[in-house]
Amino acid sequence: MAIGIVLGVFGLGFFCWLLFTLAVYALAFLAGLSAGLAAFQTGSGLIGALVVGFLVGVTVLVLGQIVLTTVRTPLIRLFIGLIYAVPAAVAGYQLCFALAGIGMPAGGWQQAFAATGAIVVGATAFARMALVIPPSAGRGSVQDTAQPAVDLRPHDQIRV
């Protein structure tokens, strides 16, 4: 019995970690899945649908990260971050609702638990997308702003 409880706690912890880790990819997964299903329905076959879905998903994720790194306007960055956070919040709501259904009867507490999970997962996805740091706002080239790892004094430098 004790082993079952310990394994249950570790399993739940693993699924929560997996949810928070993969929450950023919810929009890219949804776009890739939709494109793959559309390709499959038009007769591309299983391999073609997988390739199309993978390429669309990767493209959506990479384009979102590129836009977040190049745009300096905070309002646009907020909008792009929300575009990625809302599907993650929906996925978090669904997972937390299902987990709450295991431990409590249907009702208000189950909805409250699911809503709290959606907010936390959405905020985590937004924070992970916001971690992409934009480049400096025209303060010179990369060579001008690079700092050496070790600051050498003139007599420490090797002269050839």
Image: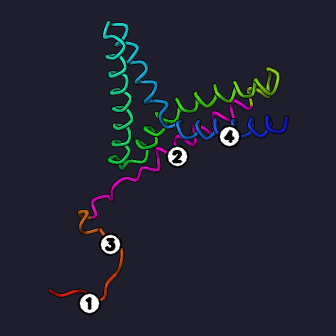
Determine contact: label 1, label 4, CB under 8 Å: no
Determine contact: label 4, label 3, CB under 8 Å: no
**Which residue lies under the disc numbered 2?**
127
State which mark lies toward you, 4 or 2. Answer: 4
Which callout, 1 or 4, points at the residue further toward the start of the chain? Answer: 4
Amino acid tagged 3: Gln
Residue at image position (36%, 50%) is: 72
| 123 shown above or below 97 | below
- Residue pushed farthest left? 160
Q: In the depicted view, which residue is nearer to us: 58 or 124?
A: 58
Task: Tell me residue 5's x, y (percent).
Answer: 80, 37
Residue at image position (63%, 35%) is: 15
The CA distance from mark 2 to mark 3 is 28 Å
Q: Quadrant of residue 50?
A: top left
Which callout, 3 or 1, points at the residue further toward the start of the chain? Answer: 3
**Residue span colored magenta:** 113-139
- The numbered disc on residue 103 is none
Q: Residues within 10 Å of mark 4 (few under 14, many from 20)?
A: few
**Quadrant housing the N terminus:** top right
- The numbered disc on residue 13 is 4
Task: Tell me residue 57's x, y (percent).
Answer: 38, 29
Which callout, 4 or 2, points at the residue further toward the start of the chain? Answer: 4
Task: Tell me residue 114's x, y (percent).
Answer: 70, 30
Amino acid tagged 2: Ala
Q: Residues within 10 Å of mark 3 (few under 14, many from 20)?
A: few
**Which residue lies under the disc numbered 3?**
147
Amino acid tagged 1: Pro
Determine contact: label 3, label 1, CB under 8 Å: no
Which callout, 1 or 2, points at the residue further toward the start of the chain? Answer: 2
